[in-house]
Image (spheres, rainbow, N blue to C red):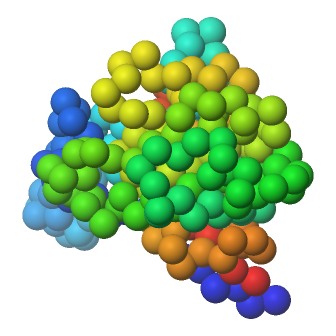
Amino acid sequence: MTSRVLDLSHELRPGMFTHPGLPGPQWQPHRTRQEYEQATGTTFQIDELRLVGNTGTYLDSPYHRFADGADLAHVPLERVVDVPIVVVDARATRTVGPEALAAALGDDDLRGTAVLVLTGGDRHWGEREYAADAPYLTSGAAAWLVERAPSLVGIDAVNIDDLADVSRPVHTLLLSAGLLIIEHLTGLGTVPARGARLHAAPLGWHGVGTWPVRAYALIP
């Protein structure tokens, strides 16, 4: 069966703005094509990257919040590969509470799914406005999700928490329950509410809690 592929990840450029207080990614060649050609007669390039884990579209593991939580190397692939998607259209509100989730999802069985919250916040990606009055989930919404045990929760905004609340209750509730988080998604408005499958595997880093993913949806 042929599937349509929808890219849900942002492209990265050196120095770009991604999150308040965090540096943008940097790049330089570790060994240039010219250096390779002079040494071997063939041309390759090896790139050297400097970036924080919270760059672009990225996945949070429990270790991001908790020192004794599972790191990226311990994220089961079945939690991030070929996961059924349910989309919550929350563009009508900045504050996404349990009422908005219940209205969209009702009594659906969410176990093992990827709940992706469409806010429209990605329209300001790369701009300072991206972090101004950004949409987010409430702690009540997080508690509602924990009870229903999806594999992961994603959002197309700067943070799944309210940036003004430094206690980060949504991260705390979701990650303490083992629910993974994907932030800075994009293009969720093109994903059907049901029927698509998510792929968003990170590198298997030991001792690292957050890392960029190339998230994409397969539409059968």
Q: In this rendering, would 208 be left or right of 122?
A: right
Q: In this rendering, would 123 be left or right of 106?
A: left
Dividing the image into 4 quarters, which one contains the N terminus? bottom right
Question: Does 86 sit above or below residue 113?
Answer: below
Question: Does 28 sit above or below residue 123?
Answer: above
Spot the residue most to the top: 68
Dividing the image into 4 quarters, which one contains the C terminus? bottom right
Find residue 206 and report its horizontal and vertical position in percent: 56, 24
Q: In this rendering, would 182 be left or right of 35?
A: right
Residue occupying image coordinates x 60% and y 75%: 191
The residue closer to the viewer here, 157 or 135, is 135
Residue 108 visible somewhere in the drawing: yes
- Tell me how many marks there are: 0
Residue occupying image coordinates x 41% and y 50%: 94
Find residue 167 and report its horizontal and vertical position in percent: 43, 16
Residue 62 visible somewhere in the drawing: no
Spot the residue most to the bottom: 2
Find residue 72 and report its horizontal and vertical position in percent: 59, 32
Residue occupying image coordinates x 74% and y 43%: 151
Residue occupying image coordinates x 33% and y 32%: 163
Residue 126 lies in quadrant: bottom left
The residue closer to the viewer here, 69 or 155, is 155
The residue closer to the viewer here, 23 or 193, is 193
Find residue 120 and report its horizontal and vertical position in percent: 40, 64
Q: In this rendering, would 210 be left or right of 30?
A: right
Question: Does 179 sit above or below residue 43?
Answer: above
